[in-house]
Amino acid sequence: MSGLGQEPTGDTAELFGLKTRASGTGSLLRRPRPVDAPEAPQQPYAAPMPPSAPPADAPAAHDPQQDATGPAKAPVPRVVVYVSDNVSKRLERYKRHARGRTNATVLIEALAAAVRTGLADVVAQATIAPPGNDLFPAADSQLRYRGGGPIQIQANLTAPQLEVFDRLVVEAQLPDRTKLAAAALNAFLPGRAD
């Protein structure tokens, strides 16, 4: 005895209510076919058929991205740049002062202002190079830009706007969009610049 109560004695089949079946596990095994019984024909394996195309006169499936006014709209490219906490707060303040301003419209304004000022000048003012010597320029990985930081800013630009943005990044000789966006926003937004 284990102390948990009285242990059952008797047949296992009786314990589980299977007394109508033959006792033991032998009834679970497959019984051999009698010698004189005919063998059941085996069906060959048929691979599932790929779905066929709908008939030509069948209506086309509904596209959920297509609305009642016309064809499906192209997805809007989302630009993600990283700015400093100061630039992020100045951006939010600037957007609150005029109705309809979004991250995208402010970024476009800042880039346009940087082009008017001169991209080279805006980038030069934003560049923070480590102390070095005059013979060897600093490595790109050592350069920092005023206005850049850990705060993520997202802007939905159209495809043509994104092309112009990328062209400006190449023209400014910067490695990515974040560096140019941070420098342009820092120079453009009202308030104390980084």
Image (cartoon, helix red, strand yellow):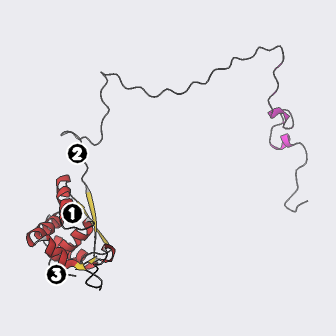
The main secondary structure of the magenta stretch is: loop
Q: Which residue is mark 3?
A: 191
Residue 169 placement (x, y as % from top left): 21, 64
Residue at x-position 11% and y-position 71%: 118
Q: Amino acid at mark 2?
A: Lys
* Upstream in sequence: badge 1 or badge 3: 1
Does residue 141 appear to the left or right of 6 in the view shown? left
Q: Amino acid at mark 1?
A: Val
Residue 7 placement (x, y as % from top left): 88, 54
Residue 25 placement (x, y as % from top left): 84, 37
Q: Considering only vertical position in the picture, is 141 above or below 29?
A: below
C-alpha span from label 2 to label 3:
38 Å
Query: Residue 21 sits in which quadrant?
Result: top right
C-alpha span from label 1 to label 3:
28 Å
C-alpha span from label 1 to label 2:
29 Å
Q: Nearer the viewer, residue 18 or 183?
A: 183
Q: Nearer the viewer, residue 117 or 88?
A: 117
* Upstream in sequence: badge 2 or badge 3: 2
Q: Which residue is mark 1?
A: 170
**Marking on residue 73:** 2
Camera-nearest label, 1 or 3: 1
- The magenta region covers 12-37
For label 2, the SS is loop
Q: Nearer the viewer, residue 119 or 155?
A: 119
Camera-nearest label, 1 or 2: 1
